[in-house]
Amino acid sequence: MRNKFINPLSRNIMYAVILIALSLLLFTAGCVESSQKNSPPASATQTPASTCSAEANVCTVDLPRSLTIDASPQVYSPLMSSTVGIGFTPNVSGLKTAGVEYEWSATYGHFVDWSAPNYTVNTLSEPVVNHGEKIYWSFIEAPESPPAPVVITVTERDITSKKPIASSSMTLSWKNNITVVVEKIE
């Protein structure tokens, strides 16, 4: 029996088999561990509803619905040469994105379009309604002191019935009279 493993080829094959077996064990143990960590406790009551079809081999899960606003840059001043304002896009999760439109409003300042192909700056009248394209918010002069925070609101609504589906708002605070900072997204 000892002569069987003296051959270098046999020994290398044996080591390869052992390494593969250990790798499979570690991989399997890692998967079980991480799925247990990410699973909600058995007492959790917020389990998404699902409907499964055995014929189609498909299960649909109702995901939590949310609409938030993505903003860039997080700090803005009209003195900046790199942008015409803070760019906003709707960030949608679990909501339909076909057959909807987005209505934007601001408590101060104005929205502008700065898009391809020619990237000219066009001031938009409020409320701005689009289909999820990026829009920019800007201002020309500082508000009266003390400056109130600026609230940006977006509402997703059905394009035909105009019925609201979801909404989100963002607060911009004044760093000084010529600079705003993204503070809070609701």
Image (cartoon, rainbow, N blue to C red):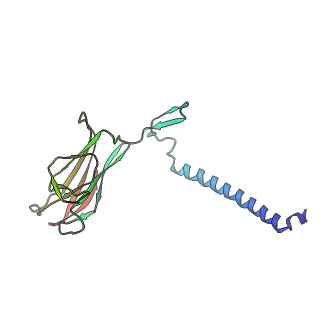
The N terminus is located in which quarter?
A: bottom right
Please report the residue visible at 36 percent of the width from the left and 42 percent of the height from the top.
Answer: 65
Horizontal arrangement in the rendering, residue 65 relative to residue 45 (left or right): left
How far across and how far down the image is residue 11, in percent? 81, 65
How far across and how far down the image is residue 176, in percent? 17, 67
**Where 84 sits versus 99, above or below?**
below
How far across and how far down the image is residue 4, in percent? 88, 63
Quarter of the image where one finds residue 5 = bottom right
Quarter of the image where one finds residue 79 = bottom left
**Nearer to me, 74 or 132:** 132
**Nearer to me, 43 or 19:** 19
Please report the residue visible at 82 percent of the width from the left and 68 percent of the height from the top.
Answer: 8
**Nearer to me, 47 or 159:** 159
**Where 50 sits versus 113, above or below?**
above
Horizontal arrangement in the rendering, residue 148 relative to residue 4 (left or right): left
How far across and how far down the image is residue 164, in percent? 25, 38
Horizontal arrangement in the rendering, residue 27 relative to residue 135 (left or right): right
